[in-house]
Image (cartoon, grey):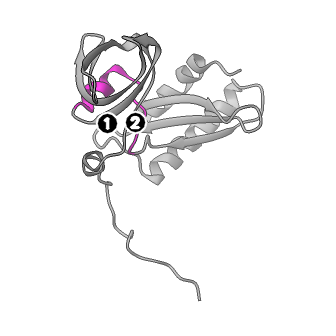
Amino acid sequence: MADIAALTRLIEPEAKALGFDLVRVAMIGGASDPTLQVMAERPDTRQLTIDDCADLSRRLSDVLDAADPIEEAYRLEVSSPGIDRPLTRLQDFEDWKGHEARIKLSDPVEGRKQLTGTLEGVQGDVVAIDVNGFKAMAVPFSAIASAKLVLTDKLIAATAPLSAEGADKVHVEG
């Protein structure tokens, strides 16, 4: 199994060198299709263009080939976090306050292992969320197993693409 912390130590400086923030490094796909997933973003836009992904992918391919940190064959997938992005850093919960999120906890808190509601920000290392139909809750960041934004109209408006130029053009071969 790949050492995600070691992979992150290899990958993060390469992302930073291109001016990107690393959002997530994960192995996905299981034994039949192991994929090293790298999500990054530009700090100013919270997105990556296709060219950004290609640049980072080429740079990471060279570094990963030289270091050879993963024993088995795998695919490299480099992407933007997308609209319903994972929330992996404490700052993400502050940055996206006011938006709806789904949080899965390592262990139940007040009898709940999953919380869905509006993020209210961060106090120290505690995430505040107004849980739909329940109440406002404060959860230690360390208790969060995974979290992601929920796709809503408000989120779509807040994450409009960098450029929609060409999106309305259809290429038809004839």
The quadrant in which residue 155 appears is top left
Along the line of sight, which residue is nearer the eye, 129 or 123?
Answer: 129
* Residue at point 54%, 23% (across, down): 8
Provide the secondary structure element on which disc 1 rests. loop
* Residue at point 63%, 38% (across, down): 61
- Residue 111 falls within the magenta-colored stretch: no
Q: CA distance from mark 2 to mark 1?
A: 6 Å
Which segment is the magenta one? 83-97
Prevalent SS, magenta region: loop
In terms of sequence position, does the residue under pointer 2 or pointer 1 come before the other? 2
* Residue at point 33%, 13% (across, down): 139
Above or below, 137 against 70 in this view is above
Percent coordinates x, y for residue 116 in the rendering: 35, 30
Quadrant (top left/top right/bottom left/bottom right) for the N terminus: top right
Q: Amino acid at mark 1?
A: Pro
Q: Residues within 10 Å of mark 1 (few under 14, many from 20)?
A: few
Q: Which residue lies under the disc numbered 2?
A: 20
Residue 161's disc is: none
Percent coordinates x, y for residue 98 in the rendering: 21, 34
Along the line of sight, which residue is nearer the eye, 44 or 28?
Answer: 28
Q: Which residue lies under the disc numbered 1?
A: 43
Percent coordinates x, y for residue 122 in the rendering: 24, 18
In the rendered structure, the answer to whether residue 2 lies left or right of residue 105 reads: right
Quadrant (top left/top right/bottom left/bottom right) for the C terminus: bottom right
In the rendered structure, the answer to whether residue 87 lies left or right of residue 95 reads: right
The quadrant in which residue 17 appears is top left
Percent coordinates x, y for residue 167 in the rendering: 39, 68
Q: Amino acid at mark 2?
A: Phe
Provide the secondary structure element on which disc 2 rests. loop
